[in-house]
Image (cartoon, coloured by chain):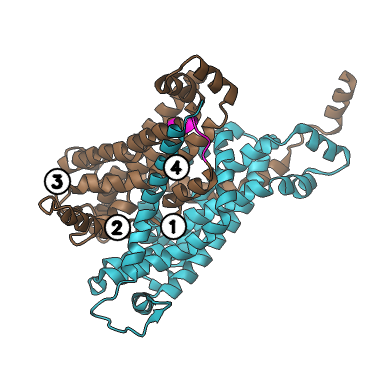
Chain colours: A cyan, B brown
């Protein structure tokens, strides 16, 4: 029997775990709305909350440009990666690809390979191609680095599609392109959705590649890099302003998460278990 | 049947099926150009002495000798192994304890708790590092709390102190990863049938026995996933260290990736940096293959 005491312990443990997970965000938020001496503008209040630090951070850091860059880079990476990996995942799951075992092994190798192993060469390569400090320097490698995970994710999904569904579609005279387009992709909608969300998060949050590949062009820098430079700049040494900048960067992702969390977590769990 | 397949062979001799090749190509081209090729280029660069300005000099394995005789590299790797404890071992330990506790109880609002516990995983590592920099700051919340308790003697700039910086950075990793471990373990535990647990409890199984003989065997797959993901994070670990301490104070929190970044892009010892990144990649590959192979063996 489950005693009331066990129930209490379990709920307390989860509550403490959740509070610990939220605490850093809470602390940075409460810091960001504390009034600073250097910017004494008490009229910058809304519903009794002081947001002068946000105004200051927004004006000093070029976050509007960074947000646009991040959005452009992330959406391009997600779309191209999805396109490539739906095709490859389908082919590797349900058709006979020559050397498929070697291909899968190579992709597995790419899945565990640390970015540190290639950033130096990527820098040289982008430099040689004259696209260092441009969007391309970020987009191309991030597509390539997202492909192993995405192909495995979709291949795993396509192998679990019941054979009867595929057979009935070929009986109806559909060719492979049609059965992918009209049967498999609609079936994979939620697997693709979860994958797209994960890719979005990975790309949006990527820091090392941005630091190495767009180090000196602020108009192509993504949000994490801008924030890192902003926080490292002595001019912005007031903690509340830095906190406000961090808050602004975290907010869009947190808001999107509020709407997507249920599907995202369910999708990750079912995807992770199938692997 | 036999004649039919015979006929087919006659009708279209050795036709190559092009569609699978066309479908796989875009992904493979991206992967080959921007992942496989750079790996070989890194290895190639690691045999040169080069500073991006003067022409390179072929030095063979000299860079590897330099790197492997540098005590700072060993201390960087030893920091990585400390981080494995904080990024991987402690989160898994916390996750297992909590899952064992929750195995006995149906929690209301489990989805809600899950969503909150996953938040550390979705937030940009730069934001994470900035918030912890504030929490650990000399005038930050931890020290304020200690002063409130009358323990101002312990108060310190946690990330600036040689004795505490490594542990302080490690705990950031614990914070980012324990929710991930919990979520995956809890979802694995849901596969355990309630009947089995009930029968066990009637037999008077202790919590330890429930953990050892029911929970542990049924979530082995999840433990392996969390182990691989978090150990790789601990060994790579650039973002959080860079944004929290840049490897300082001194080299107290330096890890191999910080070393690679600094020698490649600050000091311009490109060859040495390439050699270090190849060594780091080998270490990570070895650890993940051992873990993957161990699963294959225990599955058989």
Residue matched to label 4? B180
Question: Gap between marks 1 and 2, in whole Å?
Answer: 13 Å
Q: How many labels does the image show?
A: 4
Residue at the location (43% across, 77% down)? A47
Q: Of all residues shown, which one is farthest toward the top?
A: B203
Question: Gap between marks 4 and 2, in whole Å?
Answer: 22 Å
Foreground of the two, A56 or A76: A56
| Residue B32: in magenta span | no
Q: Where is residue A178 in the image (x, y as percent from the top left)?
A: 79, 48
User: Mark 2, chain letter?
Assistant: B
Vertically, is A88 above or below A3?
Answer: below
* First of labels 3, 4 by sequence position: 3
User: Mark 4, chain letter?
Assistant: B
Residue matched to label 1? A205
Residue B208's label in the rendered image is none
Residue B243's label in the rendered image is 2
Labelled pair 4, 2 in contact (Cβ < 8 Å): no
From where the camera sits, is residue A195 visible? no
Foreground of the two, A118 or A108: A108
| Magenta-highlighted residues | B101-107
* Crowdedness near tag 4: few (<14), some (14–19) or many (≥20) residues, C-alpha within 10 Å: many
- The reply to the same-chain question for discs 3 and 2 is yes
* Crowdedness near tag 1: few (<14), some (14–19) or many (≥20) residues, C-alpha within 10 Å: many
Residue matched to label 3? B163
- The reply to the same-chain question for discs 1 and 2 is no
């Amino acid at each position: 029997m489950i005693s009331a005491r066990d129930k209490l312990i379990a709920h307390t443990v989860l509550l403490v775990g959740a509070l610990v997970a939220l605490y850093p965000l809470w602390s940075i938020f409460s810091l960001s709305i504390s009034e600073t001496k250097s910017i004494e503008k008490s009229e910058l209040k809304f519903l009794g909350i002081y947001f002068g630090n946000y105004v200051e951070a927004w004006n000093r850091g070029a976050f509007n440009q960074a947000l646009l860059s991040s959005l452009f880079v992330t959406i391009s990476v997600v779309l191209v990666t999805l396109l490539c990996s739906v095709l490859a995942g389908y082919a590797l799951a349900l058709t006979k690809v020559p050397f498929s075992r070697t291909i899968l092994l190579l992709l597995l190798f790419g899945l565990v390979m640390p970015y540190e192993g290639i950033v130096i060469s990527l820098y040289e390569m982008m430099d040689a191609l004259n696209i260092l400090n441009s969007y391309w320097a970020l987009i191309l490698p991030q597509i390539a680095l997202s492909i192993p995970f995405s192909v495995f994710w979709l291949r795993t999904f396509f192998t679990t599609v019941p054979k009867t569904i595929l057979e009935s579609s070929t009986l109806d005279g559909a060719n492979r392109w049609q059965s992918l387009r009209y049967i498999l992709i609609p079936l994979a909608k939620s697997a693709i959705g979860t994958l797209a969300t994960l890719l979005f998060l990975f790309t949006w949050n990527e820091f090392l590649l941005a630091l190495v590949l767009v180090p000196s062009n602020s108009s192509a820098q993504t949000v994490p890099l801008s924030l890192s430079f902003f926080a490292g700049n002595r001019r912005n040494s007031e903690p509340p302003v830095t906190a406000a900048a961090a808050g602004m960067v975290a907010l869009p992702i947190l808001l999107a998460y509020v709407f997507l969390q249920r599907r995202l977590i369910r999708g990750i769990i079912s995807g992770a278990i199938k692997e | 049947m036999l004649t039919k397949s015979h006929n087919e062979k006659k009708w279209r001799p050795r036709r190559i099926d092009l569609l699978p090749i066309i479908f796989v190509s875009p992904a493979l081209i991206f992967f080959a150009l921007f992942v496989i090729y750079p790996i070989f280029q890194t290895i190639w660069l690691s045999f040169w002495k080069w500073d991006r300005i003067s022409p390179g000099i072929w030095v063979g394995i000299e860079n590897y000798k330099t790197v492997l005789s540098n005590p700072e590299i060993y201390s960087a790797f030893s920091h990585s192994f400390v981080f494995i404890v904080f990024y991987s071992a402690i989160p898994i330990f916390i996750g297992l304890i909590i899952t064992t506790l929750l195995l006995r109880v149906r929690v209301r609002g489990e989805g809600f708790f899950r969503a909150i516990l996953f938040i550390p995983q979705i937030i940009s590592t730069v934001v994470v590092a900035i918030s912890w920099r504030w929490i650990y700051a000399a005038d930050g919340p931890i020290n304020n709390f200690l002063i409130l308790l009358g323990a101002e003697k312990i108060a310190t700039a946690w990330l600036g102190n040689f004795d505490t910086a490594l542990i302080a950075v490690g705990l950031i990793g614990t914070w980012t990863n324990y929710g991930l471990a919990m979520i995956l373990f809890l979802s694995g535990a849901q596969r355990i049938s309630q009947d089995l647990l009930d029968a066990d409890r009637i037999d008077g199984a202790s919590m330890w026995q429930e953990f050892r003989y029911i929970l542990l065997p049924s979530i082995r797959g999840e433990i392996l996933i969390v182990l691989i993901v978090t150990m790789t994070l601990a060994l790579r670990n650039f973002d959080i260290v860079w944004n929290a301490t840049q490897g300082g104070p001194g080299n107290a929190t330096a890890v191999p990736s910080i070393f690679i970044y600094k020698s490649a892009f600050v000091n311009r010892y490109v060859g040495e940096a390439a050699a270090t990144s190849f060594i780091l990649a080998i270490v990570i590959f070895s650890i993940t293959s051992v873990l993957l192979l161990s699963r294959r063996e225990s599955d058989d």
